[in-house]
Amino acid sequence: MVPEVLEYLQVAPGRRYVDGTAGGGGHSQAILEASTPDGRLLSIDRDPEAIETVRERLAGFGERLTLVQGNYGDVHQICAEHDFLDVDGLLVDAGVSSHQLDEAERGFSFSQAGPLDMRMGTDAPTLEEYLAAVELDELTRALKVYGEVRKAYYIARAILDAFDAGELETTVDLANVVENTVGRGAGSGRGTSIHPATLVFQGLRIAINRELETLEAAVKAVPDVVRKGGRAVFISFHSLEDRIVKHGFRDLAEDCVCPPGLPICGCDAVQRVKVLTSKPVYASDEEVERNPRARSARLRAVEVL
């Protein structure tokens, strides 16, 4: 969604921007090109491989680009450490990146056998470490809340039983355990034909990487990172992420967040942003045709007051 990102961020020369999720460098490159000749960009990613990829890809931009390995949930601290506060725009493209999904050795997919990893960066446990420590109730909750998985308890129990028996060595092993527990046609229970392990993998990935907590922290940090009149753009890929962005922006846009029914406001909240997208913006048909993964992308934007 590069054109939409540039439009909502109002990218222009002489301004400063933050890309909280560098990924493969596509958005970072577009921002640097659109802010030529003197715009600056601070680009962040948890994944050291992503940082090196972007460093090589965007080497030609020189000192206009600052790369930082870190968690975008800590965006305020990272910006402060690099003298990059009060920026003109902040972009967060949430969720797992395409290169992480495509590389079997990262353990995000079961289309090929990969290790029990799923880490977005070095600041998270591997899936193997997570399964060795997690209790049944906690794993059940992760699958139910983060993956919206039906029969979460039975799947969680089967996963832990297989892990304790030494039967889980690869992502394919894990997918087979799920399929053997609920059947190949279980899917999501929403009339789709997705593999029953798809949402299980989503729930595990979100739990391991604390993705929703990170996203919530980044949304709350918007008014502390972006200057008045500047903008923030967040792209999410499933309902859990989009709900956090939508509600977070709504809270920042209200001048009272007290529970309904109180006779007097006691929260002292003030409106800090103006919502620019009353409904999410979706990728164009042309982009979805080029990149099917963009089909689920949802963009929301605010302007800081």
Image: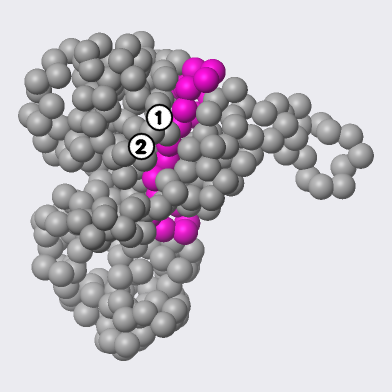
Element marked by disc 1: helix
Compared with 183, 114 (above or below) is above
Number of marks in the image? Answer: 2
Quarter of the rendering containing residue 37: top left
Q: Amino acid at mark 1?
A: Leu
Q: Are marks 2 and 1 in contact (CB under 8 Å)?
A: yes
Q: Give residue 103's quadrant in the image.
A: bottom left
In the image shown, does 252 or 282 lie closer to the viewer?
Answer: 282
* Point 89% across, 34% down: residue: 264
Image: magenta residue range:
221-241
- Relative image position of residue 166 (x, y in whole percent): 18, 73
- Residue position for label 1: 9
Q: Which mark is residue 49?
A: none
Q: Quadrant of the C terminus?
A: top right
Left or right, 62 with reference to 245: left
Left or right: 289 with respect to 104? right
Quick one: which residue is furthest to the right in this view?
Answer: 263
Query: Position of 33 compared to 105: left or right?
Result: right
Residue at the image point whose x is 32% and y is 87% from the top: 185
Q: For mark 2, what is the residue?
A: 5
Please say whether residue 256 is visible from this viewpoint. yes
* Residue 208 makes an appearance in the image: no
Q: Of the residues shown, which amino acid type is indicated by label 2?
A: Val
Can you give x and y, in whole percent of width and height, for residue 235 in the image?
39, 45
* Image position of 109 (left or right of 229): left
